[in-house]
Image: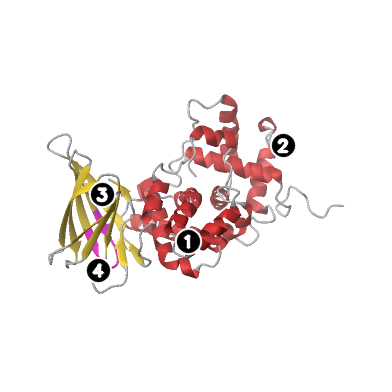
Amino acid sequence: MSSTRSDRHRAGGKPLDDYEGLAVLFESAQRGDRAALGLIAETLTPMLWQVARAQGLDRERSADAVQTAWLRLLGSLSDIHSPLALTGWLVTVTKRVAWSMRNELRAGELVGLLADEQVVDPTPPPEEQAVFADRRARLWDAVSRLSHRCRELLRVVAFVNRPEYAEISAALDMPKGSIGPTRGRCLAQLRKQLLADQEGSWR
Amino acid sequence: MNPIDPDSPRGELDELDVEILHEVRWLWESVDPVPDDLVDRVKFAVELEDADVEVVRIAEHCEVAGVRGDVRSRLITFAGDTLDFMVNVQAMGDGTLRVDGWISPPAAHPVEVRARGGPLRTSANEDGRFALDRVPAGLVQFVIRPKGRGSAVSTPTMTL
């Protein structure tokens, strides 16, 4: 879904809730409806972007890794049995493609380009209100203190709905129970840090 | 006695967790936003009718400023398992592109350039060379369907 920056701020980055809508689109896509597949792509591409970026790949190659996963899907769609499995399949393939691109770059001794999450600039846009900027700085600080794997898991899971948490967690090779019906270790850590931050008033 | 601390990893997800995850999403959307055109590129790419697709990766991409300021060309090299190919894409200054390509190993494979307004088709010659004029600038995807094979070789969709 495309949304403007100000929309996102208002909604606080709300993930899509229409999981059942996705199931209907998935059935159409399996019958060969490419427009339905395009609509699924609108929903899942922002999440897959984070998967690729979390592997430490630059922006251009991350975009290619995401597209490569979607194009490979065309040949595997009939073997995938549910929208949940589709999400898991795309996460797995995107991560694998991003890894192989990264390894290839390393083999070419371009390691300097691949500093882990080299991108990130937590400076808020100038129009952002001070209260948001402060809250984000605190959140960023707490997220930065997580382990690499916990950061990756929460970064990706934040882009999907609750029924998909366990599937995503498995696709990222996280231990069973990392997130799902229970909070899991990673989210518990982040929550604890935020709750300890009285000034951020997360509770 | 409560056997499970509600704030612990074993506690059930509650509204605060959902709120925290919303904010985590908001954080990543602002520090590392998905490129504006990526969703459109993906949607364009998956309209490809082929099911069995080998995706080539971009091995090299360089831009060359033309002699006149308004003409620019790009040289893009794609590498795959079945074949490699290279395209020189020249912006003609009127919203169209000229594409000159070379396929390796050379063979007279059918070549399709998908662009807005529909696919343009040609064939490489025995030396693996092909050329297409008047390709609309914008989203472009190169698809080669090697003779005698069921699968297509495709590039990611690019904005050219």
For mark 2, what is the residue?
A203
Q: Could you classify mark 3 by the number of other residues whose Cα lies within 10 Å: few (under 14), some (14-19), or many (20 or more)?
A: few
Chain letter of disc 2 in the image:
A
Residue B70 position in % (x across, y down) = 18, 35
The answer to if B78 sits in the magenta stretch is yes
Chain letter of disc 4 in the image:
B
Q: Are marks 3 and 4 on the same chain?
A: yes
**Residue at x-position 26% and y-position 52%:** B60
Left or right: A141 in relation to A50:
right
For mark 4, what is the residue?
B146
Question: Which label number is shown at residue A29?
Answer: 1
Residue flagged by tag 1: what amino acid is it? Answer: Ala
Q: Could you classify mark 1 by the number of other residues whose Cα lies within 10 Å: few (under 14), some (14-19), or many (20 or more)?
A: many
Q: Are marks 1 and 2 in contact (CB under 8 Å)?
A: no
Element assignment for label 2: loop
Chain letter of disc 1 in the image:
A
